[in-house]
Image (tube, grey):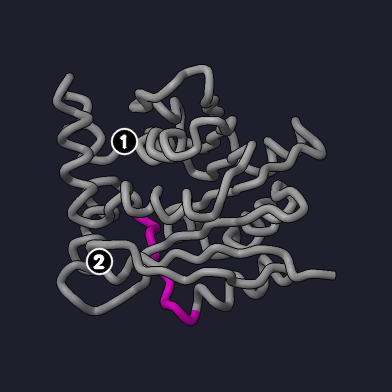
Amino acid sequence: MGLGGAVRRRLGRWEIPAADLYRSRFISLDDLATVLASLGPVKRIMEIGAGDGTLAQRICAVFPDADYVGIDIAPNPGRLFRGNPEQAKFLSMATYDYLAANPGDTFDLVVIVDVLHHIPEQLRVPVLRDAATLTAPGGTIALKDWERGRGLWHLVAYSADRYLSGDKDVRFPSLEELHSIVAEGLPEFGITLEARIPPRRNNVLWTLRRWAD
């Protein structure tokens, strides 16, 4: 556990508001959820890298009729989720483990937010290929990551992930690298939307769907 995680757990009932305030300096999860909601109604949602469940709570709020499954390799994913417990399920497992345990299972929306820069570079394409397998025909992949930059906020973001979160191997991709990873990992998908999520332009969101046959 990084320094940030240790401190957060000591905050008790103040952990959630403190975590929300801290995260809001980098990204508005409410704005992100609003953009996802604009994609239209969905029945099943998979979030790869669900983390503490903060985004999951917002996703479930804008898709109240959808079933949500969040997976993460970290222990106890979704521990801060305060939404409808009957709507959401969290599992501590990797994408390939989920596919092995649930062959043929697919989702209308697969969400991958701020995950790629935490994954070793050699595993980024395989994770996207797993995401493609998990996407139902006509479904959408929503991929958001932090674009590498040179400004103050990129330095702050790197320092937070490296020293507070404790990820010694964090590496943010450039926009060109993101395009390359997507082209290799999701060759049958095309970008249908590109957006920058406030308050930082480093937050790049793409939604992707399979090319028509």
**Residue at x 68% of width, y 42% of height:** 107
Compared with 178, 205 (above or below) is: above
Q: Quadrant of the N terminus?
A: top left
Dot 1 crowding, Cα within 10 Å, few <14, some 14–19, many 20+: few
- Span of residues in magenta: 168-176
**Residue at x 41% of width, y 77% of height:** 174
In this view of the protein, can residue 101 be seen by the observer? Answer: yes
Quadrant of the image occupied by residue 145: bottom left
Q: Main secondary structure of the magenta part?
A: loop
**Residue at x 54% of width, y 55% of height:** 39
Quadrant of the image occupied by residue 168: bottom left
- Under circle 2, the secondary element is loop
| Residue under label 1 | 1
> Disc 2 vs disc 1: which is toward the camera?
2
Q: Report the side of 13 relative to 27 (left or right).
A: left
At label 2, which amino acid type do we have? Arg
Dot 2 crowding, Cα within 10 Å, few <14, some 14–19, many 20+: some
Number of the label disc, if any, that sits on residue 200: 2
